[in-house]
Image (cartoon, rainbow, N blue to C red):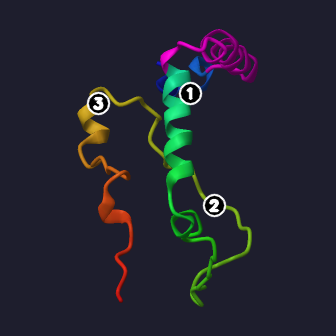
Amino acid sequence: DLAKQCVDADPSKRPTAEDLFARFYQWYHNDFSDENSEIRKQIEEANEFNEKQPSFIKSINTEVTYITNPQAIYTSRLLNFNNLPEPKNADDEVEYSVSIEPIDFTENSIVPQDSS
């Protein structure tokens, strides 16, 4: 699985930029160029869904406000990484995914109700 390769604890086992480019190029030209491919159908379906969404959903969170913490340090500084454990890959998928819960963003509940 490409995602697992990209986050492997051993950097020498991660794909290079050239490997990734080749894989993406292959996906685009072999899979996406085929009008009957599953990935192309899914992308077109997602695009159609997004086009049908009301404009207020598209504009949610476009204005960003920042609150700074007066006790935080916002300047560069050296950090001590001498006592870090050796990196390792997770042995079991449950080990790192047990707290992840799927969220269905297609539910109508994410659309704000009109208060009038």
Q: Identify the secondary structure beneath mark 1.
A: helix
Picture coordinates of residue 45, whole percent (x, y): 49, 34
The tag on residue 6 is: 1
Picture coordinates of residue 93, whole percent (x, y): 29, 30
| Main SS category, magenta section | helix
Q: Earlier in the sequence, mark 3 or mark 1?
A: 1
Q: Label 3: which residue?
A: 93
Quadrant location of residue 24? top right
Label 3–label 1 contact, CB within 8 A: no
Distance, label 2 to label 1, CA atoms, is 25 Å
Residue 44, can we see it? yes
Q: Label 2: which residue?
A: 79
**Nearer to me, 86 or 93:** 93
Quadrant location of residue 71? bottom right
Magenta-drawn stretch contains 9 = no
Residue at point 63% right, 77% down? 63
Q: Earlier in the sequence, mark 2 or mark 1?
A: 1
Picture coordinates of residue 21, whole percent (x, y): 73, 20
Q: Identify the secondary structure beneath mark 3.
A: helix
**Nearer to me, 32 or 64:** 32
Q: Is residue 57 above or below residue 83?
A: below
The magenta stretch is 15-38
Magenta-drawn stretch contains 32 = yes
Label 2–label 1 contact, CB within 8 A: no
The tag on residue 86 is: none
User: Neighbour class for label 3 at 10 Å: few (<14), some, many (≥20)?
Assistant: few
User: Neighbour class for label 2 at 10 Å: few (<14), some, many (≥20)?
Assistant: few
Residue at point 38% right, 73% down? 112
